[in-house]
Image (cartoon, helix red, strand yellow):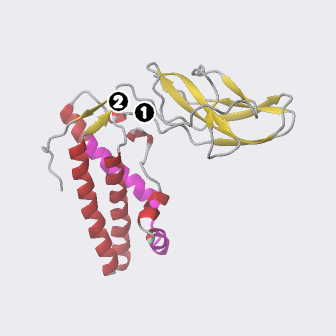
């Protein structure tokens, strides 16, 4: 699972799969869906911080995105889009959707309260896209992709980065380097391949932060996929003591 601090739990495409008319509505009224996702994320961050302040001991960086948080943020973002559409057009159809997604947002919040707050002790931030380069080598070239994920001292892996890509000529080998090491990371894993949909782990043990990995096309691709980040170490139960406007 991703950490909440890694950014919005959903993307514009996720919203469009729920509401088929969303992107057309946003385009018609100049609504920036990505900006609304960011606003929804900020709103959830404020609420989550209130719960954390009451519980004590953890920061927002320890929070793991669960299904209930993802649903809450999704409905919040949809409500924000249709709120703006309503005020731009004053069409009742947009007011109906705004009201409905606001209701679903409140329902998702209730589900979050019931499920509790999922946390990790030693959070590992999502990695930045890796730096790819080439060195001489007797290999066939091609278009290759790679992502990286940081690992902490407990062996827990953070969310993998977005993939970087590189066109490699014949007689060259792609190298993969991680950047922007988190303070608590002890190394990183490399996921690489010839297809964005099938990037598998290529190293056996975490690589030192300063290392570069040589990707050899045709080498074993039996390693696991990147996964979705850290699983919660524990879940803190929540009691309804916060007012909800």
How many badges with numbers are in the image? 2
What percent of the width, then of the height, locates residue 3?
40, 38
Q: Which mark is residue 27?
A: none
Residue at image point 32% right, 71% down = 97
Q: Position of residue 76 (x, y in %)?
A: 33, 58
Q: Residue at x 24, y 57 (%)?
A: 107
User: For the residue labelled by badge 1, is the local secondary structure a helix, a strand or a loop?
Assistant: loop
Q: Earlier in the sequence, mark 1 or mark 2?
A: 2
Q: Residues within 10 Å of mark 2 (few under 14, many from 20)?
A: some
Q: Which residue is mark 1?
A: 230
Magenta stretch in the rendered image: 23-48
Q: Residue at x 27, y 61 (%)?
A: 104
Dividing the image into 4 quarters, which one contains the C terminus? bottom left
Query: At which x and y percent is residue 68?
Result: 31, 48
Q: Is residue 32 visible?
A: no
**Where does label 2 land, which residue?**
120
The spot of residue 98 in percent (x, y) is 31, 69
Find out whether the residues at labels 1 and 2 contact each other: C-beta distance under 8 Å: yes
Q: Image point 37% across, 79% down: which residue?
A: 89
């Amino acid at each position: 699972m991703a950490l909440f601090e890694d950014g919005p739990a959903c993307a514009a495409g996720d919203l469009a799969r729920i509401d088929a008319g969303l992107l057309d509505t946003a385009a018609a009224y100049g609504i920036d869906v990505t900006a609304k996702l960011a606003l929804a994320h900020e709103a959830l961050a404020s609420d989550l911080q209130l719960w954390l302040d009451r519980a004590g001991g953890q920061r927002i960086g320890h929070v793991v995105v669960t299904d209930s948080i993802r649903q809450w943020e999704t409905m919040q973002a949809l409500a924000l889009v249709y709120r703006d559409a309503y005020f731009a057009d004053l069409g009742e159809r947009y007011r109906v959707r705004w009201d409905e997604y606001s209701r679903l947002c409140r329902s998702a919040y209730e589900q979050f309260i019931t499920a509790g707050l999922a946390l990790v002790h030693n959070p590992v931030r999502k990695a930045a896209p890796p730096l790819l380069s080439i060195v001489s080598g007797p290999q066939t070239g091609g278009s290759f992709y790679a992502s990286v994920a940081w690992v902490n001292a407990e062996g827990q892996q953070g969310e993998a980065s977005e993939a970087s890509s590189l066109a490699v000529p014949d007689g060259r080998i792609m190298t993969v380097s991680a950047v922007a090491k988190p303070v608590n990371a002890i190394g990183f894993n490399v996921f690489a391949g010839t297809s964005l949909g099938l990037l598998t782990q290529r190293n056996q043990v975490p690589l030192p932060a300063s290392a570069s990995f040589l990707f050899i096309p045709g080498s074993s691709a039996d390693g696991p996929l990147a996964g979705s980040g850290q699983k919660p170490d524990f879940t803190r139960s929540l009691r309804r003591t916060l007012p909800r406007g």
